[in-house]
């Protein structure tokens, strides 16, 4: 029976900022209370439990979500009503008690095992204070079954079910988890009208961007060889994270009698099957097995993840399949729904390919611009010479295995490659050393449909050149049902059609002058000689008349080209043009720098800063030294000049004093001497007055 409309339940979920807690909390916040008590229409794409659409149930009848976060720097998710702080235990417990359903995930972070045990124990101690029944759900892991003995020693393929939970034996690193499971089950038996408890042992989760399997998906997306730890023959129990969320919704609504539940899908896939599937559908289809002991040397995987990936359990969650109301997203498992999971992974992490085409006349700088754009956005640079060379190299490698393949199908492919090479040689001979368009277009199509281009994206450098080439290159596959169903659907390949088309515009005179100003070393060996440029310009203008150009093709499909006049851009690397295109293309849609790359960037920036500081310090010291030397030199010069001046002054004074001395010696000193002698003889009372009187009376008259 469904819950009355308008009634809302409060649910607490720990670590709503984590992969598991975040998705579970979001599913609860958009799910109507009691929805799982209604029948699910298998033919209805919307579903009453959860769906792929964005349409949410009535907001007034959804679960109210409360929770904690592990990273205090993160903001509260929009779908969470309030965050609780677990540091003050008494206050935290009082807030948790206000919730009807308490869900504790002890898989993601081992530190939550102790907290979950404390919360359920504290709730049990206060049973008498509850006005209504509380539901406590411990979300645990199948690793608590890792060392369990087989159900049937003679038939190891007999799966474990919920009924076998009392026989389970944990992995050595998950003993605390099984202790928490036992405590939760035990405390739920005291007073079921007040507190009812459940343990859900979940398989390894996947979907919505991935967590545990993220190292696989990221490596595949980047085109790297995937690593499988050990032989890969171990059976890995799995479940889609949204299917797991739906199991928890069913428990919250239905309150089943079974207290211990297994939550796994029907796959029972081996680790090798999972790795091979991801590599084939997302990567380069190459897998290498590494020894288990070397696995932990990988920085991308931790001990707990390693333990989970090497688990070997065949399990069947019979109860949830027979008794719960679930509209499965991936009941068949990861391998069976890989296309859906990859789509979720790309959308959740924003890893959507960027497809761009840069066109323009010869010598307009297309390759210079595209090279910088590919470095900025981490895209694949598609040049006609590289496409042809790569395709022929692949054909030669494949043809070299003719009559050497054990597999008949591979031998046929090798023979086809040999025939193709012979056709290419004949085509080149007939067309003055050029390949016919049909071969070039085939090479381009194969390249654009390759996994790297489909994952990261690409930038076409100067191709297609004509309207007909564009029409053929981007033509929709005849076997594409999506285009055949609707006559009005776009008649082009959705997976290769560029989102952005750039036309670099410039008159012929500008292009000629530009090439003429290039250094001889740059022009040598290229098409940018005077004769080559004129020929290429004539060919370009001939196939791009006003009435029919390759740009018209994109215009007709409403992929309107952006025209950029390159004449004002005088920079050698066309920086201004590149910046304009970056603005048009928008933000990159890739992983960006890895933590290691960020650390390397930071290290280089630190080294650069320290080097700049060292140079500045050395320059300052050198400048101060030069200034000190200059000051010392100036001081020495000043002293020398001062001495010279003093000497000159003394000489001048000496010279100027000669007439005065002569005058004194001739006219003054004799009279003065006589006056002093006379003064000594008479000894007057006032010698000075006497001497003055004497000099006055005996003053010689000088004509």
Image (cartoon, helix red, strand yellow):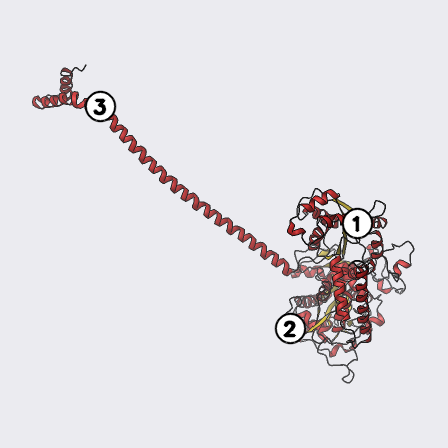
* Contact? badges 3 and 1 (CB < 8 Å): no
| Mark 3 → mark 1, Cα distance in angstroms | 106 Å
Residue at point 64%, 73% (across, down): 294
Quadrant housing residue 440: bottom right
Left or right position of 296 against 481: left
Q: Circle 3: is it few (<14), some (14-19), or many (20+) Cα within 10 Å?
A: few
Asked whether the viewer can see residue 566, the reply is: no
* Contact? badges 3 and 2 (CB < 8 Å): no
Residue at point 51%, 52% (across, down): 614
- Measuring from the top left, give residue 62's x and y in whole percent: 81, 58
**Mark number displayed over residue 294:** 2
Q: Mark 3 points at which residue?
A: 659
**Element at label 1:** helix
| Mark 1 → mark 2, Cα distance in angstroms | 58 Å
**Element at label 2:** helix
**Element at label 3:** helix
The tag earlier along the polypeptide, 3 or 2, is 2
């Amino acid at each position: 029976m469904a819950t009355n409309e308008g009634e809302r339940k409060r649910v607490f979920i720990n670590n709503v900022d984590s992969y598991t807690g975040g998705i579970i909390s979001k599913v609860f916040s958009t799910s109507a209370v009691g929805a799982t008590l209604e029948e699910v229409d298998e033919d209805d794409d919307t579903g009453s439990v959860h769906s792929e659409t964005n349409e949410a149930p009535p907001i007034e009848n959804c679960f109210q979500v409360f929770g904690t976060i592990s990273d205090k720097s993160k903001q509260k998710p929009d779908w969470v009503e309030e965050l609780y702080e677990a540091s003050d235990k008494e206050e935290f417990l009082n807030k948790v008690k206000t919730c009807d359903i308490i869900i504790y995930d002890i898989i993601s972070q081992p530190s939550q095992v102790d907290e979950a045990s404390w919360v359920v124990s504290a709730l049990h101690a206060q049973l008498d204070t509850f006005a209504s029944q509380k539901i406590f759900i411990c979300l645990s892991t199948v690793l608590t079954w890792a060392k369990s003995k087989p159900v049937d020693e003679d038939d190891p393929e007999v799966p474990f079910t919920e009924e076998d939970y009392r026989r389970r034996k944990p992995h050595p690193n998950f003993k605390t988890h099984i202790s928490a499971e036992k405590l939760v089950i035990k405390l739920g038996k005291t007073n079921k009208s007040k507190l009812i408890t459940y343990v859900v042992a979940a398989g390894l989760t996947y979907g919505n961007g991935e967590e545990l399997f993220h190292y696989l998906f990221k490596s595949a997306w980047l085109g790297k060889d995937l690593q499988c730890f050990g032989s890969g023959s171990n059976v890995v129990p799995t479940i889609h994270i949204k299917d797991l969320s739906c199991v928890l919704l069913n428990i919250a609504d239905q309150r089943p009698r079974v207290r211990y539940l297994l939550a796994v899908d029907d796959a029972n896939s081996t680790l090798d099957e999972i790795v091979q599937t991801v590599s084939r559908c997302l990567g380069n289809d190459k897998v290498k097995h590494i020894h288990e002991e070397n696995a932990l040397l990988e920085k991308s995987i931790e001990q707990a993840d390693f333990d989970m990936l090497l688990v070997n359990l065949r399990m069947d969650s019979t109860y949830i399949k027979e008794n719960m109301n679930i509209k499965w997203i991936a009941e068949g498992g990861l391998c069976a729904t890989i296309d859906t999971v990859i789509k979720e992974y790309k959308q959740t992490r924003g890893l959507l390919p960027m497809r761009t085409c840069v066109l323009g006349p010869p010598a307009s700088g297309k390759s210079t611009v595209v090279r910088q754009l590919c470095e900025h956005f981490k895209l694949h640079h598609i040049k006609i010479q590289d496409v042809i060379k790569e395709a022929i190299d692949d054909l030669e490698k494949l043809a070299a295995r003719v009559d050497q393949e054990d597999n008949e199908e591979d031998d046929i492919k090798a023979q086809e490659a040999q025939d193709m090479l012979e056709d290419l040689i004949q085509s080149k001979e007939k067309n003055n050393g050029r390949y016919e368009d049909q071969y070039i277009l085939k090479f381009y199509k194969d390249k654009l449909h390759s996994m790297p281009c489909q994952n990261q994206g690409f930038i076409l450098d100067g191709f297609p050149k004509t309207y007909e080439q564009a029409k053929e290159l981007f033509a929709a596959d005849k076997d594409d049902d999506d285009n055949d169903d609707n006559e009005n659907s776009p008649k082009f390949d959705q997976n290769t059609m560029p989102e952005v088309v750039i036309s670099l515009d410039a008159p012929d005179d500008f292009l000629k002058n530009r090439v003429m100003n290039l250094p001889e070393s740059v022009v040598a060996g290229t098409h940018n000689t005077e004769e080559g440029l004129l020929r290429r310009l004539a060919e370009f203008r001939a196939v791009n008349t006003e009435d029919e150009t390759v740009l018209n093709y994109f215009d007709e499909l409403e992929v309107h080209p952006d025209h950029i006049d390159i004449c004002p851009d005088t920079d050698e690397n066309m920086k201004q043009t590149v910046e304009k295109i970056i603005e048009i293309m928008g933000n990159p849609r890739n992983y960006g720098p890895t933590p290691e790359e960020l650390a390397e960037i930071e290290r280089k920036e630190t080294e650069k800063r320290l080097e700049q500081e060292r140079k500045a310090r050395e320059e300052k010291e050198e400048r101060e030294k030069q200034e000190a030397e200059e000051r010392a030199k100036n001081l020495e010069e000043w002293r020398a000049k001062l001495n010279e001046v003093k000497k000159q002054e003394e000489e001048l004074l000496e010279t100027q004093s000669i007439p005065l001395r002569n005058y004194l010696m001739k006219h003054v000193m004799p009279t003065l001497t006589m006056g002093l002698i006379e003064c000594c003889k008479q000894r007057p009372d006032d010698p000075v007055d006497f001497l003055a009187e004497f000099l006055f009376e005996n003053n010689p008259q000088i004509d």
